[in-house]
Image (tube, grey):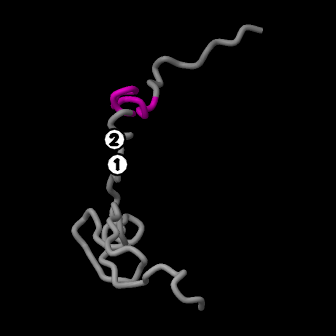
Amino acid sequence: MKKDIHPKYDKCVVSCGCGASWETRSTTSQIKVEICSSCHPFYTGTQKMVDSLGRVDRFTKKFGGEYFKKADKKKGKAKRYN
């Protein structure tokens, strides 16, 4: 390797939004992540909403809570005229 052209590679602390933290190595001294393997639904097996930008709230405000409800069967189908 050439001298004095590579970045410094030292210990780094990674901290998650759930409170978990661990130590690794990186060119930066600190990394903050929103979701990690101890809180991600794929690894934990639990379903939860991960909404960092408020997109779910904006969607429910725009379309309401009844957007995904099934249509009434009483209305029936459109009539066909032959």
Left or right placement of residue 62 versus residue 76 in this view: left
Q: Is residue 62 above or below residue 20?
A: above
Disc 2 marks which amino acid? Answer: Gly
The crowd level at tag 2 (other Cα within 10 Å; few <14, some 14-19, many 20+) is: few
Question: Residue 79 appears at what percent x and percent y?
Answer: 64, 12
- Does the segment drawn in magenta span residue 20? no
| Quadrant showing the C terminus | top right
Question: Residue 16 appears at what percent x and percent y?
Answer: 29, 67
Q: Nearer the viewer, residue 19 or 46?
A: 19
Q: Nearer the viewer, residue 81 or 18?
A: 18
Range shown magenta: 59-70
Task: Check if mark 2's residue and mark 1's residue have beta carbons within 8 Å.
Answer: yes
Q: Which residue is mark 1?
A: 51
Q: Residue at x 30, y 77 (%)?
A: 13
Which label belongs to residue 54? 2
Q: Nearer the viewer, residue 3 or 82?
A: 3
Q: Is residue 50 above or below residue 27?
A: above
